[in-house]
Image (spheres, rainbow, N blue to C red):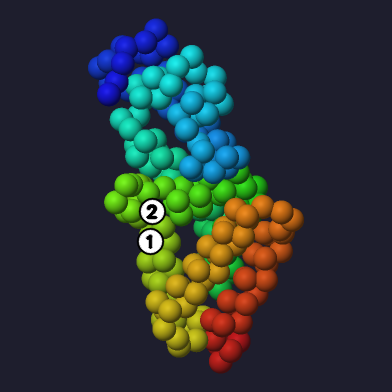
């Protein structure tokens, strides 16, 4: 349900002010979940961090809890995409592109640990009453599909040895996701060093020695 407020723009389409307010609320939600965990990140806690006069302003900009936390997931995924793409596209050789992909993932985690903690917590713990996930992690499937395609392209070019591309892509993605889960726990963790080790590991696992 949406309510009228002096803090909100008139109806009739999203405005710059409306978009800015949505960003403000999502940012506050990220901070609240990262600090308190999803279960304790109430609308009151989010409104406090967003410096809103009332929790009703959250309901003005988001239809419900699902809408807000889906926006949180989508926002962090988009931040990761924008961060990673130029780092990957700076390379053209399949092996160096794969290494850049792995290290860019871990570099993002190192630079944005708050966002990563919030994302992991929401995807892991946001559930409806029937136990189904509250939000969709569909965007996480795309990197696996793209990895499979990249690995197969590398095999066709002779840069990568023969192997099951789907199995290798799953192993790469699982290793990256394990770092996100470890980072979410907190404590001293060098994500960049882990990324370098992963890049070396999968270079050795995929490289076509006959082409060297």
Figure check: 44 above or below 135: above
Question: Can you identify the residue that label 2 sits on?
Answer: 137
Q: Nearer the viewer, residue 146 or 110?
A: 110
The secondary element bearing badge 1 is classed as helix
> Going by the image, does 71 lie left or right of 27?
left
Residue 38 appears left or right of 197:
left
Residue lying furthest right: 188
Residue ranking furthest to the bottom: 210
Q: Residue at x 62, y 77 (%)?
A: 201
Q: Which residue is mark 1?
A: 141
Furthest toward the front, the residue is 129
C-alpha distance separating marks 1 and 2: 8 Å
Lateral position of residue 44 relative to residue 196, left or right: left
Residues tagged 1 and 2 counted as in contact (Cβ below 8 A): yes
Position of residue 208 relative to residue 182, above or below, is: below
Q: Is residue 163 above or below residue 100?
A: below
Q: Quadrant of the C terminus?
A: bottom right
Quadrant of the image occupied by residue 99 = bottom right
Q: Residue at x 56, y 73 (%)?
A: 95
Label 2: element kind? loop
Q: Is residue 76 visible?
A: no
Name the one closer to the observer, 75 or 66: 66
Quarter holding residue 65:
top left
Q: In front: 78, or 134?
A: 134
In front of the other: 141 or 89:
141
Q: Position of residue 11 (x, y in %)?
A: 27, 15
Residue 73, can we see it? yes
């Amino acid at each position: 349900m949406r309510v009228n407020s002096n803090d909100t723009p008139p109806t009739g389409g999203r405005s710059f002010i409306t978009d800015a307010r949505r960003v403000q609320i999502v940012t506050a939600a990220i901070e609240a979940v990262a600090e308190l965990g999803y279960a304790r990140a109430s609308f009151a806690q989010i409104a406090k961090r967003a410096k809103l006069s009332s929790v009703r302003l959250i309901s003005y900009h988001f239809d419900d809890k699902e809408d807000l936390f889906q926006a949180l997931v989508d926002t962090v995924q988009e931040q990761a995409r924008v961060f990673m793409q130029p780092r990957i596209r700076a390379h053209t050789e399949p092996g160096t592109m794969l290494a850049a992909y792995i290290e860019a993932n871990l570099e993002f985690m190192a630079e944005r640990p708050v966002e990563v903690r919030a994302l992991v917590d929401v995807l892991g713990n946001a559930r409806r009453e029937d136990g189904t996930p509250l939000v969709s992690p569909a965007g996480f499937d795309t990197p696996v599909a793209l990895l499979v395609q990249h690995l197969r392209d590398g095999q066709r070019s002779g840069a990568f040895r023969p192997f099951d591309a789907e199995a290798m892509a799953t192993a790469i993605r699982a290793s990256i996701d394990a770092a996100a889960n470890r980072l979410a726990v907190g404590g001293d963790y060098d994500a960049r060093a882990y990324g370098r080790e992963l890049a070396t590991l999968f270079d050795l696992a995929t490289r076509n020695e006959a082409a060297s």
